[in-house]
Amino acid sequence: EPTLQYFSGIWLGVEWDDPQRGKHDGTYEGTQYFKCRHPRGGSFIRPNKANFGVDFLTAVKGRYGLNEKQDAQNGIENTCVFGKKTVEFVGRDSIEKKQSQLHRLVHISVHECTVSHAGQKEEISGTCANIRHIDLSKNLVAYWDTVIDIASQVPNLETLDISGNKMKFPSTSISKSSAFSKLTTLALNQTEITWTEVLLCAPGWPVLEELYLTSNNITVLERPDNVLQTLKLLDLSNNQLLDGSQLHLIGHLPRLEQLILTNNGIPSVHFPDADFGCKTKMFPSLKRLAINDNKISQWSSINELEKLPSLQVLECRNNPLMDTEKNPETLRQLIIAKISQLEVLNKSEIFPDERRGAELDYRKIFGKDWLAAGGHWDPVRNKPSEEFLAAHPRYPSLCLKYGAPEEGELKGQQPLTLKNQLLTLTIKCPDNPEQKPVEKKLPESMTIQRVKGLLYRLLRIPGSELKLSYESSKLKGKEVELDNDLKPLQFYSIENGDSVLVRW
């Protein structure tokens, strides 16, 4: 509260959430009155221009139309919606009715309601103790202790969103309170919390299952010791981890099923405790992983993901790796072939037919490299080099599954990155007239197997057997069955303008 020279009276120094609104860093004419994180994020304002916020209960009553003082003065009619019921309050009875409604509230949102403090002691527990879900995002809560004050009065609290409040968190371990004894979901996005502060608060979250920590500038992780052991979902999106080995520090959370690491600047992922062909002891329960918008550029990171014992769902869009293949379909097939247990890739289900096609293609495409590196059809002489096995760790298991690639399959094999000639084909569903014809460009070297995989997703067909045939644009009415999954389109002499007929 500086008294500025030449400007009489009291001024407040403020730092704006949006630094564009500020003018300086708390310094005026050479004197620093307060500190700012941003060099131009600060301003001086008069106290009467500042909003110091309201207590939690005042915000609840205002948001849910339950402000009895106002109604008593005005004697107004009012209606209020709880869940799907609309309750009408008329005249004097409204105050008592509204108070009873507060007791029944289970979900409460006071998003952007300028809440800054808990209010008088036990006021919340005496009025609306049955709350189980609170949205307190984008308010004026400045201290984690304020959150504890509110939560300790709500014994059945299960989910809490406190995102968008710039808060001061404890910097030393805190005495354990039972305020969050039933809390299973907690969102702390944009609160400026550090990972160290998360671990200091975590003993107070004994049954927490979902923790959201996006946009907090978290740069380093530490190993959670006897905390967060019940966690099933962790969202660390939009932070600055920048180093994949940071993940080893959270790799031993026993129940973690979902990890979201979008936009963290991560260049690579590796699990050094396991050799290729073996499973890592890290992330034992991890089923779903999102690594979109990172800096992953090497296929070795995809090979490493095969070591995760439970991985089923992967999102990895917008990484430099995605630019290594011109054809997104080829890229998808390579990822599927490299990660054996994957069931969903980039939100699109992998059907058994698509997996089989991807694996057979992979085995064939890298067959020449396998031979050159010391691979052989005779098991006694089959000794591929370490370099080959590091680049293609699943190759031996694919040879076990389907047999080694035959010599005939490898002759004249086009390199994967060569652009194939594209055929423009019309996709029709003769037995499903409501499905309109779709035009699609497909490479002539695409196998029937992969065409089926594409059509499953394109036409959203449930997992049943597809039967494909084609009709030449020159010979109307004559159908040729596409009966061999392993053959490419060019094998059947399909030409531009022909129609592919899909039945299931």
Image: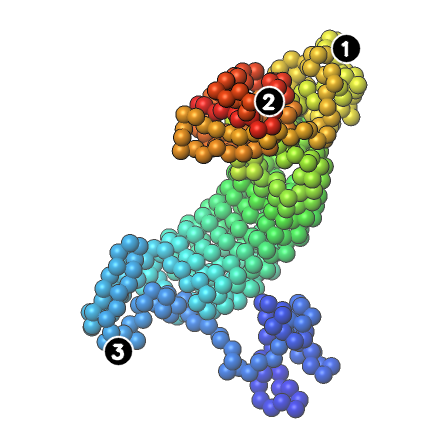
Q: Is residue 415 left or right of residue 215?
A: right
x 52%, y 63%: residue: 165
The residue that label 1 is drawn on is: 381
The residue at which mark 2 appears reads as 494
Q: Give the mark nearer the N terminus: 2 vs 3.
A: 3
Q: Say whether residue 370 is visible.
A: no
Looking at the image, tell me whether mark 2 or mark 1 is earlier in sequence order.
1
Q: Check disc 3 and report the residue beneath it.
A: 74
Residue 448, position in %: x, y?
57, 22
Quarter of the image holding residue 78? bottom left
Q: In x, y percent, where is residue 382?
A: 75, 13
248 sits left or right of 382 in the view? left
Amino acid type of disc 3? Asn
Q: Secondary structure at mark 3?
A: helix
Local crowd at mark 2 within 10 Å, few (<14), some, or many (≥20)?
Answer: many
Q: CA distance from mark 1 to mark 3?
A: 94 Å
Return the x and y of residue 423 as percentages of the image width and height. 62, 29
Identify the mark nearer the N-term, 1 or 3.
Answer: 3
Q: Is residue 219 visible?
A: yes
Q: Quadrant of residue 6?
A: bottom right
